[in-house]
Amino acid sequence: MAKSITARIRKEAVRIIRDHPEGIRYSDLQRQIHEADSSFKMNTIAGSIYDLNTHIAEVEKPSRGVYRITGADADGSAMAPPPPAVIQEEEFYSPFADWLKNDLEDVTKAIPLGGKRFKDKWGTPDVIGKRDSRPSDIVKPPIEIVSAEIKTNTNELITAFGQACAYCLFSHRSYLVVPTKATKDDLSRLDSLCQVFGLGFVLFDAECVDDPKFEIRVRPKRQDPDIHYTNKYMREIESELFR
């Protein structure tokens, strides 16, 4: 059954790639496959297409994270590599939420957020999670809220730092997540500031959604937020984070 599902997913992937002779990014391909057949789970799609070019001879990867059909275009000339796709910051929200839960194990549940969900000028975390007790815990800890600010633009690191600090108003822990390609001076300053203010500091490859290589540099200190604001903002996302 598993092989049959994988084969169906790969067949659908090839069909979609053929419709994009200029090439299609991994995340867009995954999304379009799910839209074509919602019975395919996103994790199953990911496992079936991440190395698609090694299983399907007519598919190649001209650059990282991009798939296209091998060969020539309609007029017989060699197909030019697609222009580098601009990776949107939002594409890293879900990978970081998964990493925060499964690799770092700092939360028991995390969701991508971003945008203006909290509807005020103080900003909305890009990722927010909660840490609560597990059934195996003998001593049950209280619920903790964990927030993260992710930035792909290295010209906005000071702004990102300020936003991560602002999340301490309602979060027990807050992370600042910035690209590894930032200058050494900026990274050194942020590293020191995060230690001073108790923020978590994480670096990542902002040019690769498939494997961002999140790396913890500074672990966040537990803070005591203002519970009034914690409850205020959690009401906005109660159905997503607490149920």
Image (cartoon, rainbow, N blue to C red):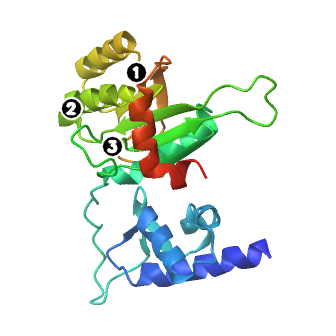
User: Which of the two marks, 1 or 3, is nearer to us in this view?
Assistant: 3
The quarter of the picture where the N terminus appears is: bottom right
- Circle 1 is placed at which residue position? 199
- Mark earlier in primary sequence (1, 3): 3
Quarter holding residue 132:
top right
Tell me which residue sits at (21%, 41%) in the image: 121
Q: Residue 24: x and y, percent?
A: 38, 70
For marks 2 and 1 on the same chain, the one whose residue lies earlier in the sequence: 2
Which label number is shown at residue 159? 2
Q: Amino acid at mark 3?
A: Thr
- Which residue is at 48% across, 16% downward? 221
Relative depth, front residue between 204 and 168: 168
Label 3 Cα neighbours within 10 Å, binned few <14 / some 14-19 / many ≥20: many
Farthest-out residue, left: 155
Q: Residue at 43% across / 34% down in the picture? A: 230
Cα distance between the residues tagged 1 and 3: 16 Å
Viewer-nearest of labels 2 and 3? 3
Q: CA distance from mark 2 to mark 1?
A: 14 Å
Among the two numbered marks 2 and 3 on one chain, the one whose residue lies closer to the N terminus: 3
Q: Residue furthest front?
A: 228
Q: Position of residue 215 (x, y in %)?
A: 48, 29
Label 3: element kind: loop
Residue tagged 3: 124
What residue type is disc 2 on? Thr
Quarter where residue 154 is shown: top left
Disc 2 is placed on an element classified as helix
Q: Is residue 23 above or below residue 206?
A: below
Residue sitting at 21 percent across and 32 percent down? Answer: 159
Q: From the viewer's side, name the closer residue of 136 and 209.
A: 136
Q: Name the image quarter holding residue 101.
A: top right
Q: Amino acid at mark 1?
A: Leu
Mark 2 vs mark 3, CA separation in Å: 13 Å
